[in-house]
Image: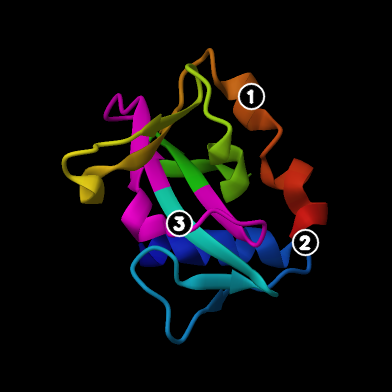
């Protein structure tokens, strides 16, 4: 995760933004850009990973100041950073964002983000270049 955070810091610095470690953060949701909170999540396309699941319990309440930073890893290198507003997960669709509720064990409920050739155009609007003005 250290290498990942260093790369994100470097990329953000090019846009005059600073990534700060949140002193009282929790696993995953422990970074800030100004007053925006970030949840870092890599997805390894080398391992043919087609989706990631984020525990609802870990992510917490969806809100405007919380972003999922999805890092697409290809050929063992982080290639693309998507800054997805957490509120986008509140409007699940069957292709990109999926809500998985487990009624018998709510702690297993999660948000799923699919990354396939079909969903990349949807995710492209969340690339760093397209989201920089929201950060």
Residue lying at 32% horizontally and 30% vertically, measured from the top left: 46
State the residue position of label 1.
122
Q: Residue furthest front?
A: 104
Comparing labels 2 and 3, the label whose residue is closer to the camera: 3
Q: Quadrant of the N terminus?
A: bottom left
The tag earlier along the polypeptide, 1 or 2, is 2
Q: CA distance from mark 1 to mark 2?
A: 23 Å
Q: Which residues are magenta?
A: 42-69
Q: Which quadrant of the structure image shows residue 84? A: top right
Label 2 near label 1: C-beta < 8 Å? no
Residue 10, position as x, y percentages in the image: 61, 64
Estimate how packed mark 2 is, as few (under 14), some (14 to 19) or many (20 or more) residues with alpha carbons within 10 Å.
few
Q: Nearer the viewer, mark 1 or mark 2?
A: 1
- The correct choice, above or below, for 7 with respect to 26 in the image is above
In the displayed structure image, the side of residue 117 where residue 125 appears, left or right? right
Cβ–Cβ under 8 Å for marks 3 and 1 = no
> Where 110 falls versus 99 (above or below)?
below
Q: Provide residue 110's location: percent of width, then percent of height.
A: 33, 42
The answer to which image quadrant residue 45 occupies is top left
The residue tagged 2 is: 15
Q: Is residue 97 above or below residue 79?
A: above
Residue depicted at x 33% and y 68%: 27
- 83 lies above or below 43: below
Residue 18 screen position, x and y as percent? 67, 73
Mark 3 or mark 1, earlier in chain: 3
For label 3, the residue is 40
Residue furthest toward the bottom? Answer: 23
Judge from the rendering whether residue 82 lies leftward or rightward of residue 75; answer left or right.
Answer: right
């Amino acid at each position: 995760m250290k290498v990942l955070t260093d790369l994100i810091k470097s990329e953000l610095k090019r846009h005059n933004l600073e990534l700060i470690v949140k002193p009282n953060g929790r696993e995953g949701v422990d970074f800030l850009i100004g007053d925006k909170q970030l949840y870092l999540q890599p997805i390894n396309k080398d391992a043919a990973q087609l989706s990631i699941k984020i525990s609802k319990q870990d992510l917490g309440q969806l809100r405007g100041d919380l972003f999922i930073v999805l890092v697409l890893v290809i050929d063992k290198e982080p290639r693309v950073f998507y800054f997805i507003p957490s509120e986008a997960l509140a409007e699940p669709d069957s292709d990109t964002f999926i809500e998985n509720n487990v009624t018998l064990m709510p702690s297993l409920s999660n948000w799923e983000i699919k990354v396939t050739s079909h969903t990349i155009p949807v995710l492209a609007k969340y690339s760093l270049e397209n989201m920089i003005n929201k950060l």
